[in-house]
Amino acid sequence: MSESQETITRRDFIRKATYATLAVAMGLSPPEEKKLELAKKTKVVLVRDPEAVDKKGRINPKVIQQMLDRSVTSLFDKKDPVESWKLLVKPEDVVGVKSNVWGPLPTPKEVEQAIKKRVMEVGVPEKKIGIDDRGVLRNRIFLNSTALINVRPLRTHHWSGVGGCIKNYIMFVPRPSKYHGNSCADLAELWRLPIVKDKTRLNILVLLTPLFYSIGPHHFDSTYIWNYKGILVGTDPVALDAVGLRLFQAKRLTYFGKESPIKPPPHHIVFADTKHKLGTSDFKKIELVKLGWKEEILL
């Protein structure tokens, strides 16, 4: 090592040591810790495409497959979608795709089939793949599952304020109403049930035509859906719901011209983080990757 290189090395060492000492004294994080904090951010990928839904509300399956592939490859920093899915499921897995069948706004079949296609290409035989919602407790695939894919549309909800990824597992209990108390505050408990615990490999929040306002348990008015034409993908259900909630808050502000708090308050999202440690609800700790169509993205 040359004298100049040695001098620089020593200078850098002294500078870093001095900063570290001051940082501790002032309650700050040294640079290395800050890098660790950044690395801990939860990655969530939003993909939008103007061709995903046409003017008549018809969903384009080819575009949906492309959107799913783009989101998953970005999530895992891969180029090939099948290679990305190999990080999620194995050929020996029994895979349950937990969908949502709520009549006015179900999980689109095009999304379900795009998921199934990639799972099969990994090597999972079709007979070991199930897609279900209300029948999961009677479905042998889900009863014997080793891997779950969680997918549903985002909408406002009478009991929980927002129906998203966290709430989508409520059909894994015989009596869902048991969780309706205090605005469904403890929905995250569902994720500790043996039938689902540690099995979820991917969460997909469908944002093609979200419902951002409703009144009552079964209310639906197409006035309050909009062609956002997106999907949100990640491994953390809490982070996805937190992003979805922020999207709704932004949409309601632009639509009503003033802040319009969601009722009941969807505090189950924060509690899933702070109380149940299921995931990250703090937007500052979420890395939101935005791909594709940017018009009126609101995030």
Image (cartoon, rainbow, N blue to C red):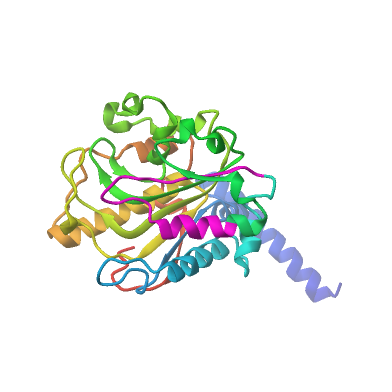
Residue 115 coordinates in the image, percent (x, y) = 52, 56
Which segment is the magenta one? 93-118
Q: Residue at x 83, y 74 (%)?
A: 3
Q: Most extreme residue toward the right, as rendered?
A: 1
Residue 170 coordinates in the image, percent (x, y) = 39, 34
Q: Most extreme residue toward the left, as rendered?
A: 257
Of 166 and 218, the residue lying toward us: 218
Residue 189 coordinates in the image, percent (x, y) = 44, 29
Of 16 and 196, the residue lying toward us: 196
Examine the rendering and report whether any part of residue 276 can be seen. Answer: no
Query: Does residue 42 lie above or below 198 as drawn?
Result: below
In the drawing, does residue 16 fall left or right of residue 113? right
Q: Residue at x 69, y 50 (%)?
A: 91
Query: Does residue 106 lie above or below 183 as drawn?
Result: below
Total marks shown come to: 0
Query: Does residue 72 lie above or below 151 as drawn?
Result: below
Examine the rendering and report whether any part of residue 25 can be seen. Answer: yes
Of 30 and 193, the residue lying toward us: 193
